[in-house]
Every structure is written in C-alpha cells, then in structure tokens.
C-alpha cells in the first residue's frame, strides 16, 4: 500500500501555473476529491488484504473535514471502526521536527550550513 501524492500534487501545481485564469476553488475541490478517493481506495485494499476492520486517520491530512466525512461514510456502511484525533491534534510532521530541533538546540547539538536533508533519518541518529 506504498503510494504517494507527489504526482497528483505536481500535476495540480503545473495546471495552475499554466492556466492563470483557472477557477482556483474548482481546482482545489477537484484535488481534494481526487486525493480523498485515492486514499480511501488504498485503505480499502489494505483492509481487504489484511482482514482488519479498523482505520486510523492521523497527521495533517486527518484534519481535512472532507476526508473525515468520506471515511466516516465508508466506515459506517462497512461496519469498520474509525479513529481520528480532534482537529487541534492533527499536526503535520513539521511540528514534530521543530520540537525535536528545539530540544537538540537546548542540548547544544548544533550543525553548520553543510547539513543536508536525510528524509528517512531516525530521531536520535
């Protein structure tokens, strides 16, 4: 179930830049619909393959009211348990990284400007 939204995000950005007169509200609604559909279809596949009957929405995406609504409809229809935090707790990974950086800074762990991004680095490494 390994998938990414990067392709659809790039397509939307390019469409927006190439068509300055495009209706932004329609473009955003279409992206929201497509992303939610992709996410829900992958979750359905995962549930079928694993035999599980629980869904947990987490991270920044779980704050989206349309995603919550569509997952709730599906969960109710299929008798699946659905869990998600209150919107105030639906933070993006940036907040976690900022917090970890703050505590590293307080502990005197600093890096110079040659530091490079390592997307799969574990905290503490």
Image (cartoon, helix red, strand yellow):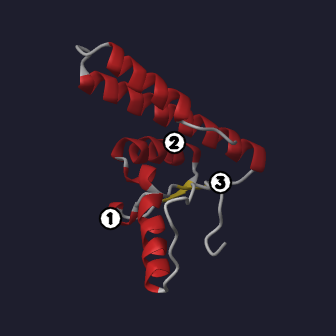
- Disc 1 designates what residue? 88
Crowding at mark 1 (Cα within 10 Å: few <14, some 14-19, many 20+)? few
Cα gap from disc 3 to disc 1, whole angstroms: 26 Å
**Cα gap from disc 3 to disc 2, whole angstroms:** 12 Å
Asked which quadrant contains residue 78, the reply is top right
Q: Nearer the viewer, residue 116 or 82?
A: 116
- In x, y percent, where is residue 105? 45, 79
Q: Residue at x 37, y 41 (%)?
A: 66
Looking at the image, is mark 1 or mark 2 earlier in the sequence?
2
Residue 75 position within the rendered picture, expressed as x and y whole percent measured from the top left: 53, 48
Residue annotated with mark 2: 74
Q: Which residue is mark 3?
A: 53
Residue depth check, mark 3 versus mark 1: number of the one nearer the observer: 1
User: Dot 2 lies on which element?
Assistant: helix
At mark 1, the secondary structure is helix
Q: Is the residue 80 above or below the residue 110 in the image?
A: above
In the picture, the quarter occupied by the C terminus is bottom right
């Amino acid at each position: 179930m390994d998938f990414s939204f990067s392709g659809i995000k790039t397509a939307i950005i390019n469409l927006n830049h190439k068509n300055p007169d495009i209706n932004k509200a329609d473009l955003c609604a279409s992206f929201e619909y497509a992303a939610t559909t992709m996410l829900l279809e992958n979750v359905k596949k995962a549930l079928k393959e694993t035999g599980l009957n629980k869904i947990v929405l987490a991270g920044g995406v779980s704050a989206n009211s349309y995603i919550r609504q569509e997952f709730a409809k599906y969960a109710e229809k299929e008798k699946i348990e659905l869990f998600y935090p209150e919107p105030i707790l639906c933070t993006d990974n940036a907040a976690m990284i900022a917090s970890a950086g703050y505590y590293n800074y307080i502990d005197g762990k600093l890096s110079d400007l040659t530091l490079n991004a390592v997307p799969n680095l574990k905290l503490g490494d």
